[in-house]
Image: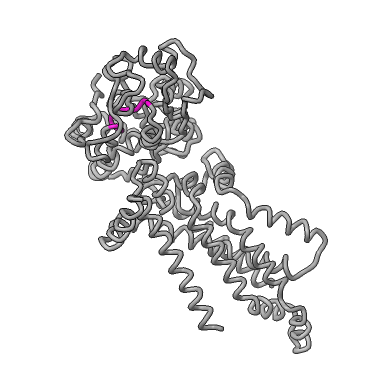
Amino acid sequence: MDYIAQGFIHAIKLLLSGNPETYSAIITTLKVSTLSISMSLLIGIPLGFLLGYFSFPGKKQCRAVVDTLLAMPTVVVGLLVYGFVTRRGPLGEMGLLFSIAGIALAQTILVIPIVISLTATAIESLDRRLRVNLLTLGARGKQIAIASLLEARYAVLTAGVTAYGRAISEVGISMMIGGNIKWHTRTITTAIALETGKGQFAMGIALGLVLLAIAFTMNGIISALKRKTA
Amino acid sequence: MKRLLRNVTLVSVLFFVLLGAQAVFAQDVLKMATTTSTDNTGLLDYLAPQIKTALGIELQWVSVGTGKALELGKNCDVDVLLVHAPAAEKKFVDDGYGVDRRQVMFNDFVIIGPKADPAGVKGQSIDEFFKTIEAKKAAFASRGDNSGTHKKEQELWKAAGFAAPDKEQWYIQTGQGMLGTITIAAEREAYTLTDRGTFIKYESNWKGNPPMVILVEGDKTLRNQYSVIPINPDKCKNVNYDLATKLALWFVGPEAQKLIGDFKLMDKQLFTPNAGE
């Protein structure tokens, strides 16, 4: 119990005193998750739209695969990506191992299924009459697609938030691909793992609270955005 | 839709170009794989700024067990190693993965256990200790991660005349770093083998009054030798062999040797430099 109270005080101290190690981990976490979330939204939303909007043979099987990938353990993604980005691997030349870009790449792979699946569900659950309505209004192919996406924007936004939550909270990938290098690839979650391993529980809890604060801020921004546009 | 797809492709390409650019700019960075003990004790945090001023090298390290560090070396993922498992290191160099292994410093291994010492091992020799543990089935925490310390522990079991335990109830394989393992041992009131440096760090975390104490120490076989090994550039074209050698020479030079000798926690010296030996 003591640790939790200590952690709370410690968290506030760390943030207020501008502790450089803590801020370095926060910035790394934000860099990595922003990079991975932008990539996964850019690739995932169009794919999710295709999967939700059109019917084609094998659609159900596609959906099953994507939904299964939702449960992909982070360490498995980490291991697979390690196999590719190690110097002995096919992408070894790019020097992605132990870099922020490498973590972002692996996290993108981790969260893309979330974006695809939730976007597809959002598009599927749109009112069927919308399409007919748009057609009668003279909208064509691309216009229909964009209007449908706009109509589903809150659900898609939720997909983004969910994916973001998964990206900032994972530790397996950041540890394996990033290597937890101080000042470079140490994220909040790998720092927590390290501090706990060193028996510094209060520090670990403090960092956990910082992570929660970031998630809280993100959600705040999103819901403010929703209210403004609603 | 087409335009959207084109944009996605464009951004993807841009992303990877950026990744490539990052790799190009990362020139004076040296990547080192090392053991948890050099990192957990704070030695590398203390040496890194000195390395930056003396050599202009930005040292980035991943701290893992020696087994994994050697594996990262084999896969060409790092430029240099700082590890402590002499037998495995010699094999690593003989197999051609590393070159010019140089010894840097040593500390020693000690057996620690709960203050109450339930199995009564205080002051025993190292062989007697393992015999007592085996006979009394006293709880023993093992790293279980193929690290230098784990390899040493297996050697010691063998020297005492046993096969290393595996599935026995009292044998706890943590699979974690040294400080993590000590924490677990303390919770379970188990004995464990640790390097002295990490134990001093643990003591200082507890402000000098830890629940675990040193019970067996001082045997000649308990010496823990650390060495620096640049990765062989013939096996790994990408490694920065010149910088790695520069760093290795710095480690064994007078400046670093003095710094290592001066590194203290709670007024105790953690590592003894011995490049000259």
Query: Which residue is found at the position 36% from the left and 16% from the top?
Result: B129
Q: Is residue B214 visible?
A: yes
Picture quadrant where residue A70 is located: bottom right
Quadrant location of the C terminus of chain B in the rendered image: top left
Q: Is residue B55 visible?
A: no
Task: Where is residue B195? Give x, y as percent.
Answer: 32, 27
Query: Which residue is found at the position 32% from the left and 45% from the top?
Result: B58
Report the side of A183 relative to A98 (left or right).
Answer: left
Task: Where is residue B181? Give x, y as percent.
Answer: 40, 34
Query: Which residue is found at the position 51% from the left and 48% from the top?
Result: A173
Q: Is residue B194 magenta?
A: yes
Residue sitting at the far bottom: A137
Task: Where is residue A203? Give x, y as percent.
Answer: 33, 50
Picture quadrant where residue A119 is located: bottom right
Query: Which residue is found at the position 32% from the left and 50% from the top?
Result: A2
Q: Which is nearer the eye, A215 or B207? A: B207
| Stretch of the chain drawn in magenta | B191-199
Q: Which is nearer the eye, B192 or A104? A: B192
Report the side of B52 relative to A108 (left or right).
Answer: left
Picture quadrant where residue A41 is located: bottom right
Q: Which is nearer the eye, B144 or B257? A: B144
Count of numbered circles on the image: 0
Quadrant location of the N terminus of chain B in the rendered image: bottom right
